Structure formats: C-alpha cells, structure tokens
Image (cartoon, grey):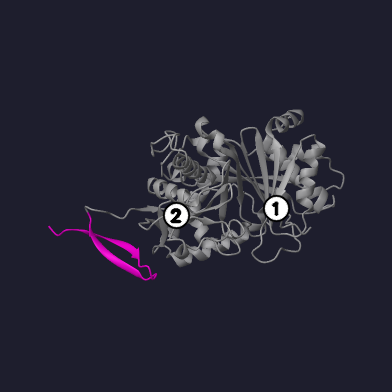
Amino acid sequence: MRKKTALIDNMSPEGEEKRTVMPAHRREIRWDKLDNTAHLFPVIAGEQMTNVYRISVTLSELVEPDLLQKALDIVLPKFDVFNVRIRKGVFWHYFEENGKRAPVVHEESTFPCQFIRPNKNNSYLFRVTYFKYRINLEVFHVLTDGMGGLNFLRELTYQYLRLLHPELNTCDNLHADTSLNREDSFMKNYRRSAAKHYKTEPAYLIKGNRLNSGEVGVMHGYMKTPQLKEVCRQYGCSINEYLVAAYTWSVYSEHLNRSVTKAPIRVAVPVNLRPYFNSITTKNFFVMISSEFRADREDYTFEEVLIKVRESLKQQMDREHLENIFSYNVSNQRNLLLRALPLPLKNLGMRFVYLKSARANTSTMTNIGKIEIDDIYKPYIDQFHAYISISKGQHIRCTVCSYEDTLVFTFAYDLVDMSVQRGFFRKLTEDGIGVEIESNGVNYG
C-alpha cells in the first residue's frame, strides 16, 4: 500500500514559503470549520473595522517579556482554537492547524485593537503584547468570543506567574476547569426557524468630527460593585439593565439634547449562550439582542428610559427567543442553494447583508461578567480590562468586566466629542456611585 503523506507549511528566515513532506504517521495537519458567527468576520474585517477585541490583565509586578514569551510558547499548543490559521476554500473559509512558532510577544506601541495581519504575525489570528504591569490579549473575533478569549488569557497568566514564581506550582498543566471543547454549539443546538428575529430598522447614529486616522480613544470608569448593586436594587433592575439605560439616557440627554428623533436609540447587547444550552465550547457562542428607546418626547425622565430599556431586554432574554435568533442564521448556512455558491459570491452576499443591517444599532455594550481567579494567584493580579473595536456606524462602543469588588466600564471611541461619555459617568455619580476615571489621553472634546 502506498504510504500517505501530509504537507507542512514553513517559512524561511527570508520570508519565502517552503513546503516539506513528512510521513502521515508522524504528523497530520488538522483542519476545522468556522462556527456560524465566524463566517462573517473574514468578509468584513479590515483596517477601518478590525473585529478585534482586547482582554488585559494588570499584575502587581512589571511584566518580564522573556517569561511571557515562554509562557505563550507553553500554553498555545494546548489550545487548538488559537493554534490555527485561516484558509480560503472553494465554498467557505476554514481553519488549518498552524505549525509555526507562537507570535512574538512585544511591548505595546500602537492604539488597541488594530487589524491583525496574519502574514506579519506567523499566520496567527491573535496577538499578545505588554506594557509595564499589563498583559494584553487581542483576538480576531473569527476565533472565539470574549469567554474563549478570557479562557486563554487566564491560562497564559497562570503559566507566566508560575514561571515568575516557581514556588506557586511546578506543574504546567491547564486548570481543571479550563475547557478545550471545540464544538460548534450553534449547529448542535440548531432548531428549524423560518423568520429572522432581530432588528434591521436604522437606529439613531452618533456622528461628529473624528479623531485622526488610526487613533482610538479609551476611557475606563472604575466603580465599586457593592455600591452599584445597591443603586440597582433601588431602581429594581439588574446591573446590565442599569448600565444600558444610563448609556441610552446619556445619548438622549447629552448628544440629542432631549430633542425628538424618529430613529430609535438602540444598544446591542451580546448574550453568552453557554449557560442557556449547557455548552462549554471555546468557539463563538453568542447572539445579539437590542434594547430600544424611542425619543418621541422632549421630557423623558431617566426612570422612564430605564423602564423602556428594561422591558425591551427582558422580552428577548428567554431560551426560545435566543434559540430562534441563531437558528435563523444557521438555516441560511444550511441552505443547499447558498452552500453551493462559490466563496467569492458568498462574500458579496454576506457583505451586502451586513452593510444593510450595520446601522440597526446605535452602539454595542458587551459585559464579560465577573472574572474569577484561583486564590493562589490573586496576590499577583490587580485588575482586568476589556474593550472591543469600533464598528461601522458605531463610533462609541462599551465593554464591562469586574474583578473582586471593582467593576470597570470602558468606552472605546473615535469621535472628538465626548459628551456621551461625560454624561454617562455624570449620571452614575448623581445616583451616588463613586467613579474613578482613567483614559489613554486621546481627549479632544
């Protein structure tokens, strides 16, 4: 019988591609499909809309880059979801195992969430940088969502701290609770669905003078979670509902100056589907729901805005509705006629659909949730941050995460005017929440 072979791609030091042949019993290249959500990201991503998010951890000691690189070299081979490159097939993009060395860890020198060019990153779709006490993980959304990214950053941090402090643990194994599951939970939980279940009507868009090309403003607001919870208890709402309402209120009262507008203020809220469908996948598994407020009067109070936001979110937060949202998307992917279209035609179609629906939301607010860390590592970890890149029509986007008793609310923006950000934090302080603000210095408004 003829011996099978597997082709392994390598790059020479000069950057020229070489191909070597190895027996299949020694090494086989693994490949994998993109999950349902991921198919869109390679089509729409570029310098102006990178679809990159960042999760970072701030340590109590200055980062040692050599040890961070060593930690990445150890951890990366264990995470198949990250250890890939993307390829173009005849009908779909697909992932292929990346046999190259891990991306080079380097000191941060640019604005966050810049476009990731695989040909300058050893074909990987994520990057790891550092700055003083902070380790940054930036991920092209095609790989995984925030939960998958946090999963990876936590293990990278644990490994780094073990190298820095050998007395912590000499074992390089992953934490027992860390998932390596790669199932496409969209496909697994798909149910036949005939109608779309999300908004496409144009929303009110925040416009204005832009920052210089390539610049991204970042503003963090630190607040104590117990204090925030008490305010939410008084309003009779959840933390997420309160924060979305405060943002909506700021757009209405600051940017619109309480004027009437036909288009609704709509905030997209990603929902992690894993708890609803008992999933532990490290691939993307989320859907978008949207809060909605129509500014048809000039005298709305914050309480009235909160009620409308809370009601619109609650109506969508049930398992059946969430299932219908992603099942509609999966049904398009499973359509035999669409599946038969070559990739270039699919790309044109997906780009058209995206551009048509891109203006359906004023902004996006992502809540990573409470980040849990093993007690043994807590003395070395001070804080976490997260933020997402600017998107088409959305010049201000928000991210929330909490660690220990501190919640961090982060704005990423490319507008000169910062009235929305100021109005948001002003509302919180008026409600008795102490807020400490930090920014990257891109403040022109």
Left or right for 239, reference 173: right
Whether the magenta-drawn stretch holds residue 71 is answered as: no
- Location of the N terminus by quadrant is bottom left
Left or right for 298, reference 65: right
Q: Name the one closer to the observer, 366 or 172.
A: 172
Secondary structure beneath label 2: loop
Vertical placement of residue 232 versus 14, above or below: above
Q: Quadrant of residue 324?
A: top right
Label 1 Cα neighbours within 10 Å, binned few <14 / some 14-19 / many ≥20: many
Q: Name the one closer to the observer, 220 or 263.
A: 220
Left or right for 73, reference 200: left
Left or right for 249, reference 69: right
Any part of residue 225 in sight: yes
Secondary structure beneath label 1: loop
Residue 394 locus on image (x, y percent): 67, 56
Any part of residue 311 in sight: no
Q: Earlier in the sequence, mark 2 or mark 1?
A: 2
- Location of the C terminus by quadrant is bottom right
Residue 219 locus on image (x, y percent): 70, 50
Residue with the most extreme left position: 1
Residue located beneath label 2 in the image: 335
Q: Which residues are magenta?
A: 1-24
Q: Quadrant of residue 45?
A: bottom right
Whether the magenta-drawn stretch holds residue 9 is answered as: yes
For image coordinates 80% across by 35% down, the residue present is 431
Residue located beneath label 1 in the image: 362
Three-letter amino acid code at the position of disc 1: Thr
